Structure formats: C-alpha cells, structure tokens
Amino acid sequence: MRFTALGDLLIKAISTFFFIGYLPLIPGTFGSIAGVGIFYLLAGSSRSSYFLFLFCIMVLGVLTSGRAEKLLNKKDPGCIVIDEVMGMLIALCFLPPEPKIVFLAFIIFRILDMLKPFPAGRLQNLHGAIGVMGDDLVAGAYASIVLHVILNLSRAV
C-alpha cells in the first residue's frame, strides 16, 4: 500500500489524536485524558450529538489505526491513542459530568485497558484496526457497566 506524504501526516494526526500520542511516557493515559476533555466539551449537547461524535471517532480510528501501524511498522504502537479517546468516551456514556464520577471512570477504564479482560485481550491480538480499537471498545464498555452498577448501588443505599 502506498501513501503520500500528506496522507501519511493525516493518518498519523488522526490516529495519534492530533499528535497527543507522541507525548512522552504514558501516551495512552494522555489519550484517555483527551477523551475526558471531549466528554466535557460535549456535556451540554444532546445524546444523539454525543453518539454521532463517538461514532465518528470509531470510524476514524478504524480507518486510520491499521494504516498507522503499517506506516510505523509496529503492531499497536503506543502513539496511536484514538482508541483510548474512543474507549474513554464509551466509559462515560450516560454519566453525569461530575468530577468524582468522571475521575472514577478514568481510573476504571485505565485499569481495564491494562488488564484486558475477556474478550479484550483476544481482540488486541488481532491484526490491523480491529486489534487496535477492539480492546479499548471492550474496556470502555466494561468501565461504563461497572460505573453504572456502582452509581445504582450507591443510590440504593
């Protein structure tokens, strides 16, 4: 597959979420923080707008992350963080923008992203975009479920 210089730059820009993935030491954490920032930017919008944005991030991630792997000649390089942005937005679905809840979502998502509970670990082993994006989709969904259970239990007490 042949890329142009401008195309390469665009793929890198999107997959690293505007080069956030090149920040040192903990790029996945920085990508998750970017997801939190987007969550707060979208906090006043409708659910349909939120899900449209999330869908766009998913599509862009699928379209660019596999190509970025080829450009960088490495499987799921740490600088690709659009998957963490997506996962964090999934983790925060239907949650209020309260700092304590968002912080808890961030911690739970990061832990689950590192632990890779089934089927996240298997998805990550797949090649291309599905391998890059799939594990974070699962971690985000699990984090959202855990948070909703915690919130519902705390309201019941």
Image (tube, rainbow, N blue to C red):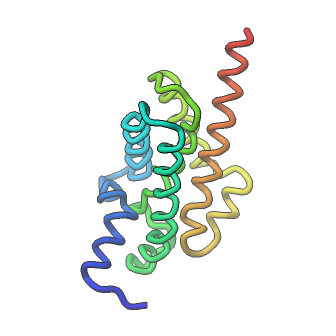
Q: Nearer the viewer, residue 65 or 26?
A: 65
Residue 33 % position (x, y)? 40, 41
For residue 72, above or below residue 140: below
Q: Residue at x 56, y 44 (%)?
A: 90
Q: Nearer the viewer, residue 90 or 135?
A: 90
- Dividing the picture into quadrants, the one containing residue 155 is top right
Question: Most extreme residue toward the bottom, as rendered?
Answer: 2
Residue 99 % position (x, y)? 44, 23
Question: Most extreme residue toward the top, as rendered?
Answer: 157
For residue 105, above or below residue 61: above
Residue 112 % position (x, y)? 61, 44
- Dividing the picture into quadrants, the one containing residue 91 is top right
Question: Most extreme residue toward the left, as rendered?
Answer: 6
Q: Looking at the figure, which quarter contains the C terminus?
A: top right
Residue 18 % position (x, y)? 30, 58
Total of numbered circles in the picture? Answer: 0
Q: Looking at the figure, which quarter contains the N terminus?
A: bottom left
Q: Residue at x 29, y 59 (%)?
A: 19
Q: Residue at x 60, y 53 (%)?
A: 137
Q: Residue at x 31, y 65 (%)?
A: 13
Task: Please state if 94 lies on the left or on the right of 72 as rendered.
Answer: right
Q: Nearer the viewer, residue 115 or 83?
A: 83
Task: Please state if 79 lies on the left or on the right of 87 as rendered.
Answer: left
Task: Please state if 19 lies on the left or on the right of 139 as rendered.
Answer: left
